C-alpha cells in the first residue's frame, strides 16, 4: 500500500530548539510495521547539509530507526546506486530547504524515478516543508525568497493533483501568498501549520498533529470567492478523493 506523510514544519532537535514533531514521526515509523526500520534521509534541499543529517540521525535513532543518508551534490553516485539505496530502505525522509533546487537535482540524478518506484513498493515517503511540498503537483515555496523577496509557485513530483503550503501559521507571508497563488492554480491547496501533517495511506487520508493547536486547511477559489476551510483531525481515515474537491466543510470561512 502506498504511504505518504507530509509535515507542514516543526523542529526536530537542532541546537537551541525543542523537538516538536515526535508524535508525527512515531506515526511515520509505525507505518513500516517494523521495530527498527531503516530511514534514509535526503538533505538535497539544504544543499546536503551534514549538520542537518546529524540532527535527523540523533532524533530518529532515539525513536528506534537505523538512519542513513543519500548525498547527491558533489558526489559521483550513479542512478543505479541511487535506485538501489532508495529501494532498500523502509522510510524516505526529505528535509526542508530549497524545493526548486531539490527537484531539479532529483530529476537530473534520476531520484524522481527511484522515489516513484519506492512509492509503488509501499516504502513510507515523508518529510517536512520542502519534503512535504515535493509529493504534490505544486507548492508554495520560498525557493527564490532571497532574490525576489516573494514566495513562488513551484512544481513537485505530482503524486497528488493539489498544491501544498507548509508553515501556514509560522510565517506571516504564507497566507496572502497562497491566496494570490491559488487565483491562477486549478484545484485546491492543502495548507499545513507547523506540527501538523497529512497522512495519505492508499486512497484514504487523515490529519495528524504533534501540537493540539496546529491546523490544516483546504484552500481554493470558487465563484470568485476565496475559501479557507479547516480540515479536522480525526482518528478515522477519509477518502482522499473528497479532499481534493472544491466542496465545503461545515466550518466554512469565505473571503
Image (tube, rainbow, N blue to C red):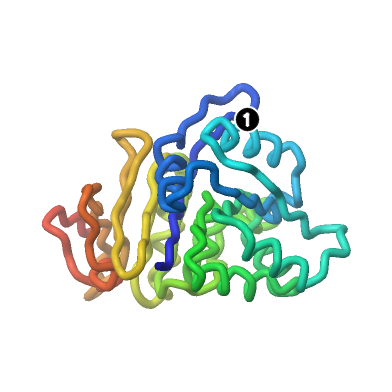
Give the residue furthest to the front.
Answer: 35
Q: 77 or 240: which is nearer to us?
A: 77
The x, y position of residue 55, in whole percent, is 65, 34
The x, y position of residue 148, in whole percent, is 65, 57
Residue 17 sits in which quadrant? top right
Residue at 74% across, 37% down: 51
Residue at 21% across, 48% down: 234
> Few, some or many C-alpha atoms within 10 Å of disc 1 (few <14, some 14-19, many ≥20)?
some
Give the residue furthest to the left.
Answer: 250
Residue at 52% across, 49% down: 128
Q: In the displayed structure, would residue 102 be above or below residue 46? A: below
Residue 88 sits in which quadrant? bottom right
Which residue position is annotated with label 1? 14
Is residue 191 left or right of 74 when viewed as pictured? left
In the picture, which quadrant includes the N terminus? bottom left
Q: How many marks?
A: 1
Can residue 169 be seen in this snapshot? no
Residue 87 sits in which quadrant? bottom right
Amino acid at each position: 500500500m502506498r504511504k505518504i506523510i507530509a509535515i507542514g514544519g516543526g523542529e526536530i532537535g537542532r541546537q537551541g530548539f525543542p523537538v516538536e514533531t515526535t508524535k508525527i514521526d512515531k506515526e511515520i515509523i509505525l507505518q513500516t510495521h517494523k521495530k527498527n526500520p531503516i530511514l534514509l534521509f535526503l538533505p538535497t534541499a539544504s544543499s546536503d547539509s551534514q549538520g542537518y543529517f546529524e540532527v535527523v540521525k540523533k532524533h530518529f535513532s532515539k525513536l528506534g530507526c537505523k538512519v542513513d543518508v543519500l548525498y547527491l551534490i558533489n558526489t559521483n553516485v550513479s542512478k543505479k546506486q541511487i535506485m538501489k539505496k532508495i529501494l532498500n530502505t523502509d522510510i524516505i525522509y526529505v528535509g526542508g530547504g530549497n524545493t526548486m533546487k531539490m527537484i531539479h537535482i532529483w530529476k537530473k540524478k534520476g531520484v524522481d524515478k527511484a522515489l516513484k518506484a519506492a512509492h509503488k513498493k509501499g516504502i513510507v515517503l515523508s518529510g517536512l516543508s520542502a519534503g512535504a511540498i515535493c509529493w504534490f503537483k505544486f507548492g508554495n515555496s520560498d525557493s527564490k525568497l532571497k532574490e525576489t523577496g516573494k514566495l513562488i509557485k513551484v512544481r513537485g513530483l505530482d503524486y497528488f493533483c493539489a498544491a501544498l503550503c507548509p508553515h501556514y501559521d509560522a510565517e506571516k507571508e504564507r497566507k496572502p501568498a497562497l491566496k494570490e497563488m491559488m487565483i491562477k492554480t486549478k484545484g485546491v491547496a492543502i495548507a499545513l501549520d507547523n506540527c501538523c501533517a497529512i497522512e495519505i495511506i492508499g486512497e484514504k487520508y487523515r490529519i495528524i498533529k504533534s501540537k493540539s493547536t496546529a491546523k490544516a486547511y483546504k484552500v481554493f477559489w470558487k465563484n470568485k470567492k476565496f475559501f479557507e476551510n479547516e480540515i479536522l483531525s480525526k482518528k478515522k481515515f477519509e477518502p482522499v478523493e473528497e479532499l481534493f474537491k472544491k466542496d465545503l466543510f461545515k466550518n466554512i470561512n469565505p473571503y
